[in-house]
Image (cartoon, rainbow, N blue to C red):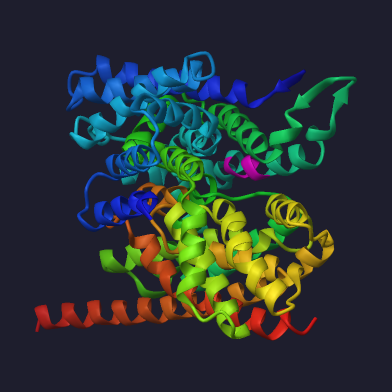
């Protein structure tokens, strides 16, 4: 039971809004001490695992230079301008189309996209541009909601396409764990049973982005109404 | 022998971080100049020489970065980029050519996943075939920088300056995913998982097939939320709850259970700040005031998809 102290530290730290890095490090140290590891061993374990997991930071880190460069020369403005010409575009439809592209491409084993490479420079500005074109200026909170949903579309497309059709990382992990436990299941069965959830996830996203579109319309209308009251 | 292995990309990022640290140290207008320079400098050393340094030294360097961040010795971006008018004018001038470098990132990723990763002369490989996904994306980023420089005719210092601005927008949260992965490792070494699985199994009436399905799916989601990673939760919850109750006790299909179980874990990933690279770093990248805005947008999604998973598993796992 005492080993769960790390989870308690994390929950308490997040609730008290203490610096997240500090919370995570404290949780690791507390867990290690409770499991009877000496302090220096815990720090060394952190060092070893931090180096082993450098690849997690790599794509975001390397992407920043080119995205910053292109943004300086107006990439986001161009993305917004381009989508404004598409009559049928709404913020929700842009995000749904992106998630569909993401789910299908990752199911075929190709990882195109990402928060730094696609969402910040292209997807979010296009969704915002589509909303601007329809409704004019939007309140800051509405723009924030559009951006948050752009990140959500990226995550849903990424997570729930991965396990379908083509055997990739997650499917191989599942296969390995089951095999070690004495169950030899086929890779095809695992991929196939990922499809229903992939469709359900896309349906759930469709529902959320429609709600987003309705919210944008409502917020824009409220803003216009508010302005009229200011200038009678 | 692999020409473009991860170490090459670690070195490139290390040099970039070193330049960021150097710019901060040399800039008198940079608030909290030395703390900022030290933080990015330490991270640069981890990327340049992490493998060569003893783990204990790296561990104390990580501790130093955490202390710098927690005591607010880091500043956000202070340098200014072009104005909105300048950017609009530049967008008008360059038109759709601006998209080319950005689109080169996915194009390079596709070409290198499908083609370059298979190129080799004997034992001499172009790409590290063990890390195709990550190295393909990194290669795409490098190709795009070159294309972007050619297109804009900007000096080499510009991508460094602009990248440094974006890096400082993300700030200390950049290393959060790496630190969380390390925490997951410590949890595994200490044996946290079996305790959780045992608790859930004892607390719930798993003699009912439906309860077994709910316990497994919700257990996957909850433990993923604690670990920030479904891959870490999967073996623990599957061996602790899924196999003994759904498969052994009630005769469920292991393939259906495992496939939908992993996807239930991903629902947890949508709802936790512990999955920082998916939820927290993007909120900062998109310059949202609320660090948890992405998680809040994803809560209804995570819960709905989890509900769908429970229903799907209950209706299929005991039937096929």
Q: x, y percentage for residue A165? A: 78, 63
Give the vertical position of B78 relative to A5 (above or below).
Answer: above
Q: How many numbered marks does the figure carry? A: 0
Is A14 covered by the magenta stretch?
A: no
Left of A199 or right of it: where is B184? left
In the depicted structure, whether residue B40 falls above or below residue B265: above
Residue B314 position by quadrant: bottom right
Question: Residue at horizontal 46%, vertical 36%?
Answer: A64
Which span of residues is magenta-colored? B102-106
Q: Is residue B219 left or right of residue B158?
A: right
Q: Position of residue B32 (x, y in %)?
A: 18, 26
Q: Is residue B11 above or below residue A36?
A: above
Horizontal arrangement in the rendering, residue B228 relative to residue B109 (left or right): left
Place residue B291 in its image quadrant: bottom left
Classify the position of the N terminus of chain B by image quarter. top right
Asked whether residue B82 appears in the rendered view, the answer is: no
Q: Is residue B103 found inside the magenta-colored segment of the image?
A: yes
Tell me what residue is drawn at x 47 percent, y 57 percent. Answer: B195
Instruction: Residue B177 in the image: state x and y as whole percent.
Output: 44, 42
**A51 or A159, which lies in front?**
A51
Residue at image position (67%, 58%) is A162
| Relative to A165, residue A169 above or below | above
């Amino acid at each position: 039971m005492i080993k769960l102290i790390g989870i308690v530290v994390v929950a308490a730290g997040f609730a008290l809004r203490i610096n997240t890095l500090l919370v995570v490090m404290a949780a690791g140290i507390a867990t290690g001490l409770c499991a009877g590891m000496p302090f220096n061993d815990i720090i060394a374990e952190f060092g070893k695992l931090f180096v082993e997991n450098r690849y997690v930071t790599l794509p975001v880190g390397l992407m920043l230079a080119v995205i910053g460069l292109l943004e300086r020369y107006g990439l986001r403005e161009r993305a917004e301008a381009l989508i404004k010409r598409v009559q049928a575009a709404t913020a929700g439809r842009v995000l749904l189309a992106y998630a569909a592209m993401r789910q299908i491409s990752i199911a075929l084993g190709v990882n195109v996209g990402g928060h730094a490479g696609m969402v910040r420079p292209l997807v979010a500005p296009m969704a915002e541009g589509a909303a601007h074109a329809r409704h004019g200026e939007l309140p800051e909170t509405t723009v924030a909601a559009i951006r948050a949903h752009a990140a959500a579309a990226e995550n849903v497309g990424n997570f729930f396409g991965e396990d379908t059709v083509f055997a990739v990382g997650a499917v191989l992990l599942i296969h390995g764990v089951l095999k070690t436990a004495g169950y030899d299941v086929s890779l095809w069965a695992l991929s196939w049973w990922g499809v229903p959830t992939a469709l359900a996830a896309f349906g759930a996203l469709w529902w959320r982005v429609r709600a987003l579109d309705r919210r944008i319309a409502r917020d824009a209308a409220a803003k216009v109404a508010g302005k009229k009251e200011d200038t009678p | 022998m692999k020409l473009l292995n991860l170490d090459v990309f670690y070195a490139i990022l290390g040099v970039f971080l070193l330049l960021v640290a150097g710019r901060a140290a040399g800039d008198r207008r940079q608030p909290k100049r030395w703390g900022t320079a030290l933080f990015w400098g330490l991270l640069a050393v981890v990327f340049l020489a992490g493998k060569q340094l003893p783990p204990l030294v790296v561990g104390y360097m990580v501790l130093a970065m955490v202390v710098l961040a927690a005591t607010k010795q880091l500043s956000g971006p202070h340098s200014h980029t072009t104005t909105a008018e300048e950017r609009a004018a530049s967008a008008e001038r360059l038109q759709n050519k601006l998209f080319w470098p950005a689109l080169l990132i996915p194009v390079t990723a596709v070409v290198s996943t499908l083609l370059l990763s298979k190129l080799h002369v004997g034992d001499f490989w172009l790409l590290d075939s063990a890390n195709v996904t990550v190295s393909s994306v990194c290669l795409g980023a490098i190709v795009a920088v070159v294309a972007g420089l050619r297109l804009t005719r900007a000096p080499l210092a510009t991508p460094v300056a602009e990248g440094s601005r974006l890096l400082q927008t993300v700030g200390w949260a950049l290393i959060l995913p790496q630190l969380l992965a390390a925490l997951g490792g410590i949890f595994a070494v200490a044996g946290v998982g079996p305790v959780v699985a045992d608790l859930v199994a004892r607390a719930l009436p798993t003699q009912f097939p439906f309860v077994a399905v709910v316990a497994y799916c919700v257990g996957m989601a909850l433990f993923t939320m604690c670990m920030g990673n479904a891959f870490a939760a999967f073996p623990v919850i599957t061996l602790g709850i899924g196999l003994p109750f759904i498969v052994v006790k009630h005769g469920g299909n292991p393939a259906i259970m495992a496939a939908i179980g992993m996807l239930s874990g991903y629902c947890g990933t949508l709802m936790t700040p512990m999955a920082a690279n998916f939820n927290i770093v993007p909120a900062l990248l998109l310059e949202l005031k609320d660090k948890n805005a992405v998680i809040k947008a994803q809560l209804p999604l995570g819960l709905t998809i989890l509900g769908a998973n429970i229903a799907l598993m209950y209706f299929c796992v005991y039937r096929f």
